Image: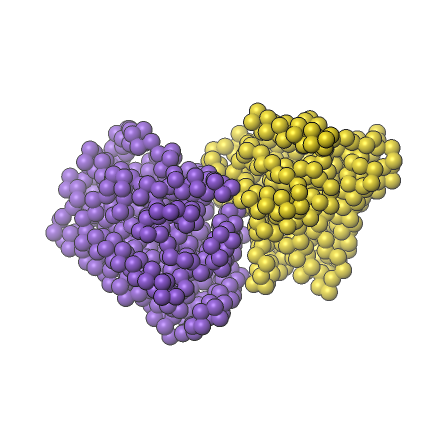
């Protein structure tokens, strides 16, 4: 089995039940990119990022009316179907309204019905305004999260444990960035499709940092064997992508996705803790502010980030993929469009798609037309 | 709040409702005069701590009130199109975006909003921050945001204790955060306006708000125990909400007292807009500003009276706070405000408690999205023995409102599910 196959096999575990243990450590599932996975690792668990699964929503349908992000609905359905029952616990954050609703509804379902297949849960309420007041609150939230995880693990979590875990996760983030610079935007052109890159990065959320870093390092070392990918270079913005469905649609039209600013992809490499005077404050900064996703962050911040990342990738086109009821990204689009115009990169916004959709006819038609025009322009 | 609908008109009959809408027009004209004279004006979201602006004498307009004016003037469709033309989504947060859209209109209601210098909002959901930042970009207003926080654990039955025990119920970290945010916002406003936040004046504002809400509580309790109901929500909404947006003033306190006294007088005399009341209904959700006459039809057809809306209910239960430190007490009022009406278990258990307290026979729950935790609200009300009908509608968007279809839907609900419950209640109460 090649290293890419190995990574893909790990990635595909996202759609199955959460394993009880990974790399000889019990797992803790988490929902929300803001959850400080370092604390989970420092407690002696392996963090496992819990995704949705297209088509899995039935068990949650009665609890969730229209207006809730389909990703959160799917995650709730999977949790109610006991797909995280083997985990030692479940941690959720306030990274977006979908996750907040997921927590509120799950907490209420457990109060009213007490589903046995749902693991014990906690919530780490990291906030996003760039103010000292929010940082102080976040620090208290992190401290409480550390205490709770310490109770789950039945052992103290020291700052030295946190430092060690942060170094380990920083190594993951360093390699995620290296996958971008060496395999997607390096001088030899893209060596991975966007879909493959999503798989490589996504595997990091489903195994221990130790195992993933070994595989990623091997993939980077073997880069010379990878074929060069041709096509219009697309940078993907908009909503998070917890499956390759949107990537498949875009790349089936002859494009290659060379970067993205959502936290299931390249953005996951940006939450760097780094050397710090105080590890807990550094964890707060990294998780609350360092890698602005659309929800919780200013449209201007997002637009600046999109321009920076898209130009670094050498993108010919930015695609904003919008998902129904994931409301924030559509509000970024006007500023993103303006900012990208200034650097000469066009933006096409896909009409809001249902969660898990592989793109409707309108979306595919719009993308095909845009890509066709760009290809003609590049040929001229 | 509903007097000015241009759809089916509301027939507000209380003098206080008429006085409130008259006052609001006069107040708005004066606000525009102050703005023209150079006073900075703020736009605030409904659940933002407006009391600090009152204490600083900074005039403000409530975003949702202005949206209700725009919707009542049948402007929502046009305004959502104006947003879309500027690249903004027109299918999200309509109720919260109409005010911004109104600034793109060449012929807005009441001559339009004055220039806005500050916007204050709490940031529930993913979009509000971006909406208010758009105010900053489009209109040069300074956005002063308050974080929305979430507690890990909560006591579902908050209404009994929150007046005094808010620190325990809401939680110290959330109160600490909002107190610090309020301190920062006050300092910013002092620097920007050259005014000084006077502690004594602020205490007076806080006391006036408590007095006002006590009258609202008394009115709510009186309506709850009186049949036939002395008023309907067509009266209570304007009589409560216009003073609510003016809270912290003597006028608002006095308006609430007048409202209570009118309700009391009617109750004592046995007067009612529907003397043949057979069914008591609750309206869950924001008001149907573009079709306020909707409520009246059921009264005339079935003797089914909408006696409850959240506006009086939350005024009665949600605002009263006592504490030695007024700024911290204000944080105790607002740090968990969205939980009370929009998040389980606080919202769901409170709606159910209100249904029982107000002797409700059926609830009509209007929602477009699931922001309120609709399943949990409906489940809790039904568990209290009150049938619920959920209908689709958005206070800020008349485009999808099918008046005839919804009317038929509610009529069927009343006939088939509510009438038997009401009959049992009446016979129980008669016994």
Q: Is residue A341 visible?
A: yes
Question: Residue B370, percent across and down?
Answer: 45, 39
Q: Is residue B74 left or right of residue B261?
A: right
Disc count in the image? 0
Question: Residue A59, percent across and down?
Answer: 53, 32
In this view, B393 is above or below A171: above
Q: In the rendered image, which quarter is residue A252 located in? A: top right
Which chain is rendered purple in the image?
B
Question: Residue B175, percent across and down?
Answer: 49, 62
Colour pattern: by chain
Q: Which residue is nearer to you in this view: A171 or A78?
A: A171
Q: Is residue B222 left or right of residue B124?
A: left
In this view, B81 is above or below B333: above
Q: Is residue B56 left or right of residue B173?
A: left
Question: Measuring 57% from the left and 43% from the top, which residue is drawn there?
Answer: A333
**Chain A, chosen colour in render:** yellow
Question: Measuring 25% from the left and 53% from the top, which residue is drawn there?
Answer: B21
Q: Which residue is nearer to you in this view: B334 or B225?
A: B334
The residue sitting at the left extreme is: B269
**On the rendered image, what quadrant is the C terminus of chain B found in?**
top left
Q: Is residue A149 visible?
A: no
Q: Is residue A355 left or right of residue B283?
A: right
Question: Residue A309, percent across and down?
Answer: 70, 46
In this view, B331 is above or below B429: below
The residue sitting at the top extreme is: A361
In this view, A47 is above or below A130: above
The residue sitting at the front extreme is: A380
Question: Measuring 74% from the left and 54% from the top, which residue is drawn there?
Answer: A166
Question: Measuring 21% from the left and 59% from the top, which residue is drawn there?
Answer: B258
């Amino acid at each position: 089995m090649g290293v890419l196959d190995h990574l893909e096999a790990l990635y595909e575990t996202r759609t199955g039940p959460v394993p009880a243990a990974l790399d000889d450590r019990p797992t803790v599932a988490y929902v929300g990119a803001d959850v400080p996975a370092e604390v989970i690792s420092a407690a002696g668990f392996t963090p496992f990022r819990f995704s949705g699964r297209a088509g899995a929503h039935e068990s949650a349908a009665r609890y969730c009316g229209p207006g809730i992000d389909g990703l959160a609905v799917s995650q709730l359905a999977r949790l109610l179907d006991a797909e995280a029952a083997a985990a030692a616990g479940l941690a959720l954050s306030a990274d977006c309204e979908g996750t907040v609703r997921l927590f509120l509804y799950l907490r209420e379902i457990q109060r009213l019905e007490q589903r046995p297949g749902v693991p014990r849960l906690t919530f780490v309420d990291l906030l996003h305004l760039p103010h000292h007041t929010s940082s102080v609150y976040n620090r208290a939230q992190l401290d409480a999260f550390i205490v709770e995880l310490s109770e789950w693990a039945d052992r103290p979590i020291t700052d030295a444990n946190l430092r060690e875990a942060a170094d380990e996760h920083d190594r993951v983030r360093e390699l995620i960035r290296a996958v971008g610079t060496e395999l997607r935007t390096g001088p030899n052109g893209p060596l991975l499709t966007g879909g493959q890159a999503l798989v490589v990065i996504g595997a990091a959320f489903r195994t221990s940092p130790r195992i993933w870093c070994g595989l990623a390092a091997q993939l980077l070392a073997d880069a010379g064997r990878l074929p060069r990918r041709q096509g219009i270079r697309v940078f993907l913005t908009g909503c998070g992508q917890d499956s390759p469905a949107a990537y498949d649609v875009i790349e089936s039209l002859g494009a290659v996705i060379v970067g993205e600013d959502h936290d299931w992809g390249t953005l996951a490499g940006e939450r760097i803790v780094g050397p710090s005077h105080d590890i807990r404050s550094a964890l707060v900064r990294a998780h609350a502010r360092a890698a602005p996703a659309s929800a919780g962050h200013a449209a201007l911040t997002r637009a600046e980030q999109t321009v920076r990342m898209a130009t670094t990738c050498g993108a010919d086109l930015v695609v904003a993929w919008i998902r129904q009821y994931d409301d924030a990204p559509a509000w970024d689009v006007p500023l993103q469009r303006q900012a990208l115009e200034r650097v000469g990169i066009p933006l096409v916004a896909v009409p809001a798609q249902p969660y898990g959709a592989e793109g409707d006819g309108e979306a595919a038609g719009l993308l095909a037309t845009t890509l066709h025009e760009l290809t003609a322009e590049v040929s001229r | 709040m509903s007097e000015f609908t241009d759809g089916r008109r509301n027939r507000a009959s209380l003098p206080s409702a008429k006085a409130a809408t008259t006052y609001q027009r006069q107040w708005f004209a004066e606000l525009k005069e102050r703005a023209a004279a150079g006073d900075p004006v703020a736009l605030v979201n409904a659940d933002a701590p407006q009391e600090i602006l009152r204490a600083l004498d900074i005039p403000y307009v409530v975003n949702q009130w202005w949206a209700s004016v725009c919707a009542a003037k049948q402007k929502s469709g046009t305004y959502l199109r104006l947003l879309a033309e500027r690249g903004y989504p027109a299918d999200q947060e309509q109720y919260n975006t109409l005010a911004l859209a109104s600034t793109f209109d060449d012929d807005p209601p009441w001559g339009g909003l004055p220039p806005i210098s500050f916007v204050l909002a709490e940031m529930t959901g993913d979009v509000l921050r971006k909406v208010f930042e758009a105010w900053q970009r489009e209109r040069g207003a300074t956005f002063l945001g308050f974080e929305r926080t979430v507690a890990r654990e909560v006591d579902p039955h908050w209404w009994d204790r929150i007046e005094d025990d808010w620190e325990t119920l809401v939680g110290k970290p959330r109160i600490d955060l909002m107190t610090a945010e309020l301190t920062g916002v006050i300092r910013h406003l002092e620097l920007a306006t050259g005014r000084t936040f006077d502690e004594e004046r602020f205490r007076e504002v806080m006391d006036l708000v408590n007095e006002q809400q006590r009258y609202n509580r008394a009115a709510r309790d009186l309506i709850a125990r009186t049949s036939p109901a002395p008023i309907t929500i067509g009266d209570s909404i304007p009589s409560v909400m216009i003073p609510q947006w003016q809270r912290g003033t003597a006028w608002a306190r006095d308006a609430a007292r007048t409202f209570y006294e009118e309700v009391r007088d009617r109750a004592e005399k046995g007067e009612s807009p529907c003397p043949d009341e057979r069914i008591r209904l609750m309206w869950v959700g924001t008001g149907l500003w573009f079709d306020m006459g909707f409520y009246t039809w059921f009264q005339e057809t079935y003797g089914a009276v909408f006696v409850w809306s959240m506006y009086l209910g939350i005024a009665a239960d949600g605002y009263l706070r006592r504490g030695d430190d007024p700024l911290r007490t204000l944080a105790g009022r607002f740090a968990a405000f969205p939980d009370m009406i929009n998040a389980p278990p606080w919202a769901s258990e409170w709606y159910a408690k209100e249904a029982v307290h107000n002797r409700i026979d059926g609830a009509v729950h209007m929602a477009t999205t699931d922001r309120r935790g609709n399943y949990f609200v409906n489940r809790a009300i039904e568990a209290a023995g009150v049938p619920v009908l959920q209908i689709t509608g958005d206070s800020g968007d008349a485009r999808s409102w099918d008046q005839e279809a919804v009317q038929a839907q509610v009529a069927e609900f009343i006939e088939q599910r509510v009438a038997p419950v009401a009959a049992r209640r009446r016979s129980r109460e008669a016994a």
